[in-house]
Amino acid sequence: MSIPSTAAQLATLAEAEGGHHDSLNPVVTGGAAFIILLLLLWVTTRFNRDR
């Protein structure tokens, strides 16, 4: 099984299962992920004061 054929099969499966959820707004999801990553960055820099 090659990578392109596997990707094509997974894409077909995702389309068959509906693919999108109306409750998941991409802007909200991306914004929340960005805020979480910034929070993790801030926590990491607070614990790494010796540098």
Image (tube, rainbow, N blue to C red):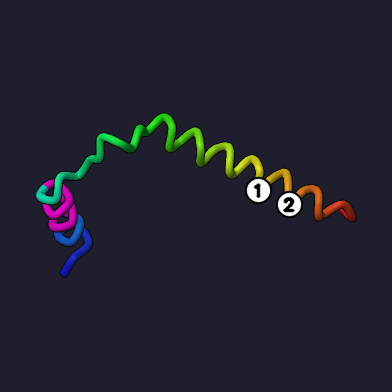
Give residue 24's position: percent from left, percent from top: 33, 37
Alpha carbon of mark 2 to alpha carbon of mark 1: how far?
6 Å
Numbered range of the magenta stretch: 8-15
Tell me if residue 45 comes above or below residue 28 in the rendering.
Answer: below
Q: Is residue 46 left or right of residue 40?
A: right
The residue that appears at 81% across and 48% down in the rendered structure is: 46
Q: Is residue 1 left or right of residue 42?
A: left
The residue that appears at 18% across and 61% down in the rendered structure is: 6
Tell me if residue 34 comes above or below residue 10 in the rendering.
Answer: above
Tell me if residue 15 comes above or below residue 10 in the rendering.
Answer: above
Q: Is residue 19 magenta?
A: no
Check contact, mark 2 vs mark 1: CB within 8 A: yes
Task: Name the residue that disc number 2 marks.
Answer: 44
Tell me if residue 1 comes above or below residue 34 in the rendering.
Answer: below
Badge 2: residue crowd in 10 Å (few <14, some 14–19, many ≥20): few
- Per the picture, the main secondary structure of the magenta-coloured stretch is helix
Q: Is residue 9 magenta?
A: yes
